Image: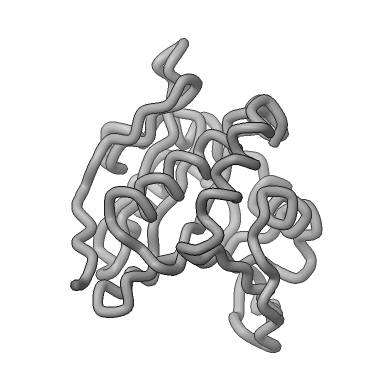
Amino acid sequence: MSLRVTPVVLRGKEVRLEPLGLIHAQGLYNRGRVEADWTHLPRSCFVDLADTRHWIDEALDVEGQLPFAIVETAKDKVIGSTRYLNIRPEHRSLEIGWTWLGQNWQRTAINTETKLLLLSHAFEKLGCVRVEFKTDTRNERSQRALQRIGATKEGVLRNHRIVQDEFVRDSVYFSVISSEWLDVKERLERLGGRS
């Protein structure tokens, strides 16, 4: 049995994850212009609204990805983005990545709830047996966050990607597998307000 990933809205208490579209461009541009927030991502921050729209178009054009806008439910405000990527239906696995939030929502319960929604859907609805994450070795905050939720560090891929300004990046891989999911879910629910 292989998984079938289709666009879906994932609803939590604080956030709603909805399929990314051009309708989100202005909100993403408003939150995605801080250069420091993009240091460990494959590209730099948005330079204008046209650049934001181009980024959305690119995200939607890549096969094996399902990008989401992160919407704060209380204010119905777009505050960031995330995606399923490297979707491998035949292996019932996928990656969660490209997650970024505007500065006012970093280190809040938003990221924790976003991960809970994505992982719950992956394991409980899609039937995944593996969900992976990768991060720049320089991004220690992301690595600590993944370890805190119970993801297992698997190793480092050296000279894995060339990113901003031709920087040759090493990537650290983490994963959660189906047999670990209930423990990880419990940790995420306990963390609640901490990211």
> Which residue ends up furthest to the bottom in the rendered image?
158
Check the picture and name the quadrant holding the N terminus: bottom left
**Colour basis:** one colour
Quadrant holding the C terminus: top right
Left or right of residue 113, residue 21 in this image: left
Total number of numbered discs in the rendering: 0
Vertical placement of 183 versus 155: above or below? Answer: above
Name the spot of residue 158 as percent of width and height, x first: 70, 88
Between 113 and 163, the residue placed more toward the observer is 113
Residue drawn where x is 52% and y is 49% of the image: 182
- Toward the viewer: 69 or 84? 84
Residue visible at 50% across and 30% down in the picture: 79
Residue 5 placement, left or right of 134: left
| Up-down relation of residue 170 to residue 129 (above or below) | below
Judging depth in this view, the residue of 129 and 8 nearest the camera is 129
| Residue under the point 80% across and 59% down | 140
Residue lying at the far top of the rendered structure: 74
Q: Nearer the viewer, residue 43 or 154?
A: 154
- Please say if 73 is above or below 181: above
Residue 2, given in percent of the width and then of the height, sits at 21, 71
169 on left or right of 123: right
Image spot of residue 80 (x, y percent)? 50, 37
Residue at 34 percent across and 46 percent down: it is: 53
Q: Quadrant of residue 17?
A: top left
Q: Position of residue 119 (x, y in %)?
A: 45, 50
In the rendered structure, the answer to whether residue 17 lies left or right of residue 104 reads left
